[in-house]
Amino acid sequence: MERRNSLTFRRLYGGTAAQPDVIINLPDKKHLVIDSKVSLVAYERYCSTLENDGNGERHLKDHIASIRTHVNDLSKKNYQDLYQISTPDFVMMFVPLDPALILARQNDRKLFVDAFEKGIFLVCPAILLFALQTIATLWRREKQNANAMEIARRGGALYDKFVGFYEQLENLGTCIRKTQECYDDSLNKLKTGRGNLIRQVEMIKKLGAKSSKSLPYDAIEDEDRLLPEVETPSLESTSEEEEEF
């Protein structure tokens, strides 16, 4: 396992015809497959023929046909069924020699288009490096976009929480105001008006009720403080009056 440019490469050794050479792990659990099993025998014969007699037309056609055959073979392979990888959007077919791919492209203008329509992207060393750099850039942008979306999601959740907290404070303020109003109303009934409770109990006390405690001075209205003391007959005087009678 190797990690380069924020992409994960899985290099597979001893591959069979149904095994890719490299798997690149992309964001969102997608994968990019690189296959480099294309044959360059016809290309080598073409180069040898040019050195000897300069006539390599037949080997050039064989070289292009070899690339097209491998493109068709790759398009039929189901790499998604191997190694628990997701369906790749396309497979990179790696031609290890830049001149070999350039020669085929120069003599078959539809080669790249036909391959891409079958989900095959033809690359040589120079193109592969550029493609991987592009993928790395897209990966970073994908991550940045994901981070931006996560920030937006968390920001929205935080805003909703703030609104809920504000509404709770509003409700708390309403409850406090209602409690104050209820307190004021109860206090008014207790100490204001001619029939208030403080006036009644003070009158009872002045009539002679026995008590060891007194209300605070400021709890009694001025007019209640001026209530005359009422003389209550003692038990002795009451008894004497009954005997005389």
Image (cartoon, grey):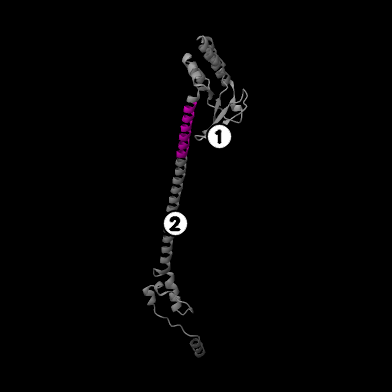
Q: Residue furthest front?
A: 52
The residue located at (52%, 14%) in the rendering is 47
Where disc 1 sits, the SS reads strand
- The amino acid on which the numbered mark 1 sits, given as a three-letter code, is Glu
Contact between labelled residues 2 and 1, with CB atoms less than 8 Å apart:
no
In front here: 225 or 123? Answer: 123
Residue 82 is labelled as none
The residue located at (43%, 58%) in the rendering is 176
Q: Which residues are magenta?
A: 128-149
Residue 61, given in percent of the width and then of the height, sits at: 53, 12
How dense is the environment of label 1, judged by Cα within 10 Å: few (below 14), some, or many (20 and up)? Answer: few
- Upstream in sequence: badge 1 or badge 2: 1
Q: Quadrant of residue 221?
A: bottom left
- The amino acid on which the numbered mark 2 sits, given as a three-letter code, is Cys
In front here: 108 or 205? Answer: 108
Name the side, left or right, on which 85 lies relative to 191.
Answer: right
Where disc 2 sits, the SS reads helix
Residue 175 is labelled as 2
Q: CA distance from mark 1 to mark 2?
A: 64 Å
Q: Quick check: 126 above or below 68?
A: below
Q: Is residue 218 magenta?
A: no
Main SS type for the magenta part? helix
In front here: 56 or 50? Answer: 50
Q: Quick check: 68 above or below 143?
A: above
Q: Is residue 93 visible?
A: yes
Residue 2 is labelled as 1
